[in-house]
Structure formats: structure tokens, C-alpha cells
Amino acid sequence: MGKGSLREKKERHEKIINCLRSESYWTSARLCDQLDISYRTLMRDLAELKESGVPIESERGRGGGISIVGRWGLNRLQLNNSEVITLLVSLGITESIKSPILVDNIHSIKSRISSAFPIEQQQIISKVRKRVLIGNIASDKVLQGYVQPQQDVIGDLSDSFFNLTKVKIKYKSANNELTERLIEPHILYLEFPVWYFLCWDDLRKSVRLFRIDRIVHTKKTNMIFKLRRNEILRGRSDKLINHI
């Protein structure tokens, strides 16, 4: 069997696992249609997956049910959406550092993590991933003025970011000028280890970039906002590099 066939089989096995993870119950006929493979190929693949340790249960016949026992693999962790994003951000940071030891498999790992969850959760995660961007390492000039962000501030900002709600902040500029803002946190951006929010400033009706460690106070609101990613990113593409 050639390399191409082995690669195709591996990809097919991954697709079978992803399907079985996405829903609790499949029939063999439906899996065959979904993957565009024969019943004989499906049965052979399922046997190989079982032999490799994947806990698959199957009933005989094309109408027989097929499922993965329990919450096998990453699903056993029962991560919520924000926890998945935190994990992906951590991998994105590792990727941006370009470590010769760790970076080779990062892209593959991120894809596998994303596909390990039910379809509905994958869709939510995919939308949030596009709003988290990883840039370069922060400059020495930036690091000189950097302080650890306040934990309660981080909590409020995270809630607002994931739930698409506006948040009131008090922001201290580089000149120590303190101003109050009402912001829509659209894009989370990292120049390691400094985090920024690219926001719509509701009071000034314009896009603003806020360093999180300079936000000294927050107050959550129940005001929902709609994403305006293209408008927010316009003119900022030179600074914002890669999404996770």
C-alpha cells in the first residue's frame, strides 16, 4: 500500500472520529453517506479504530447504530468555550515564539483540538478564534512600563468579550491621564506578554486600542453589541498579525 493510501486512511479515520464525537448516535448508512465510502470500507475502518483503542460500539447491518462510548478523548475534559480559547491562545503564543523544539506540530494540534468538540461548540469556538490575534514579542520600550493587569479587570473584560456586552472602563494613558470610556471589546490582541483590546469606543464613536494593564477599573453592563470586525480592523492590518 502506498503512502497516499496510508494518508487517506488516516484522514478517513479522523473524519469518522470527528463525526462520532459531534453527535451521540450515527447509523452505518448515514456515516457511509457522510464520508462517501462503502459499507465494507467503513466496517474495516471501525475495526481498525477499535483495535487501536478507540471505544466504539456498533450494531450489525447498514441501519445499525455506531457511537463512541462516553466522552472519549478531549471531550472528557468538558471544557467550556472560554477554556478552549484559553488553550488555543496558549498554543498560539508558543507558535509565535517560534521555538524550534515545540512549534512543528502546533498548527495540527490546534486543528485537532477545535475538531474534538461537538459541531455547535466548534462553530462558537471558530467565531471567537477569529477575534483573538497574536503578534510579535513586545518591545523593550513597551515592557518598561508594563505592569500585571488586575484580576478583577481581566474577569470583567473576558465576560464582556465572550458575551458581546459593552463594558465601562477607567483608562490611564501613557501620560497618566485618567479617562472614562464605554467600549465594545471586539478584538483581543497579544504582543507577548502585553494584551490589548481593539474596541469600538461608544462615547467617542471611533476605534481605539487599549492596553489591558492600563485599565484600572471596569463595570460590566447588560448592553449587547453586534460584531463589526471589518470596520474595527480597517487600517489596523499592519499591526494585527495572526489569529489563533
Image: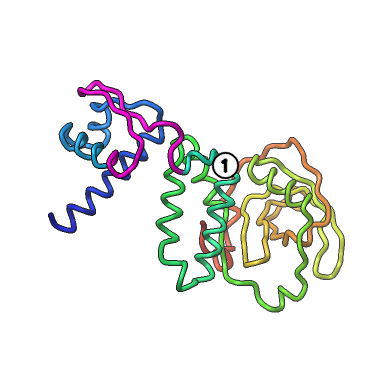
Q: Residues within 10 Å of mark 1 (few under 14, many from 20)?
A: some
Which image quadrant: the N terminus? bottom left
| Residue at screen point 41% across, 62% down | 105
Rendered location of residue 98, percent (x, y): 49, 71
* Residue sticking out furthest to the top: 63
| Residue numbers of the magenta segment | 49-73
Answer with left or right where residue 168 lies relative to residue 138.
Answer: right
| Residue at screen point 84% across, 70% down | 175
Q: Amino acid at mark 1?
A: Asn
Answer with left or right where residue 215 lies relative to residue 78.
Answer: right
Q: Which residue lies under the disc numbered 1?
A: 81
| Residue at screen point 40% across, 56% down | 108
Rendered location of residue 161, percent (x, y): 66, 46
Q: Is residue 226 above or below residue 62?
A: below
Q: Is residue 62 above or below residue 176?
A: above
Is residue 52 part of the magenta span, yes or no? Answer: yes
Is residue 193 part of the magenta span, yes or no? Answer: no
